[in-house]
Image: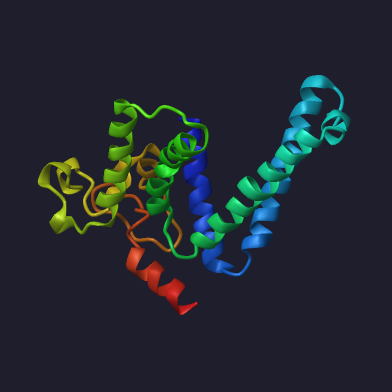
Amino acid sequence: MAQPIGFGMGYILLEEIMSDYPKEAAGVTAVKLLVVALSSWLFYFTVNGVLPDFTPVLESPTAMEGLLWTGLVTTSLSLTLESVAFRYVDATSASVIFTTEPLWAALFAVWLISEPFGFADGIGGALVVLANVLMILPNSMVPKALGRRSLGLGDIGPSWATAEGAMLCLVPRRHSVPALNFGMSSSLSRGDEGAGAREAR
């Protein structure tokens, strides 16, 4: 439960930060990376009583290649692009879009290192794609059995597709209006207003 709650809260905060400071994606990413680094060092020091020794890593060309790739490309660049994307995508939609990450990883693994991709993998991937398709469909086009109203979620959107999205619908949001079925703020209740505000910027 900690993972979807933590990521969900992070998405909410990131959306609101990028709404207020749309040109600060690099600064937001730098702060996030700094906090993670300091927290990691603090945890290591708490457990071991000393700071980590980076000498073996720095002396290994292979380790440095991996460190630079994962640090600069798959972490720093990815988080910067994520921050930019949150200028245009709300937190609930993002939580559904992020479910495609393991699918892309599996497809690249098949392509690059010939990993097997079985029937069960295909079914799981199809469900992930279906969740994203349902996210962009209007209520009138969603089958009744899958409709948000049939699940007692009113018009809060497809956030039931992920644990993170479901949690997001229950968390009070700044500048939002009460959701009828929950009596709490819905992350999509200000969708049109938020989109207009982002376009105005």
Residue at the extreme left: 144
Q: Report x, y in % for residue 172.
A: 42, 51
Residue that protrudes farthest toward the bottom in the picture: 200
For residue 77, above or below residue 175: above
Find residue 141 and report its horizontal and vertical position in percent: 14, 56
Q: How many numbered tags mark residues here?
A: 0
Quarter of the view holding residue 175: bottom left
Frontmost residue, 14 versus 116:
116
Residue 194, x across and y down, in percent:
40, 67
Please tell me whether residue 199 is drawn above or below residue 76 in the rendered image: below
In the image, what residue occupies the spot 66% across and 61% down? 26
Which quadrant is the N terminus positioned in?
top left
* Residue occupying image coordinates x 46% and y 39%: 111
Q: Is residue 133 left or right of residue 172?
A: left
Image coords of residue 177 (percent x, y): 34, 61
In the depicted view, which residue is nearer to us: 47 or 100? 100
Protein image colouring: rainbow
Residue at (31%, 41%) from the top-left corner?
A: 161
Q: Is 9 placed left or right of 127 in the picture?
A: right
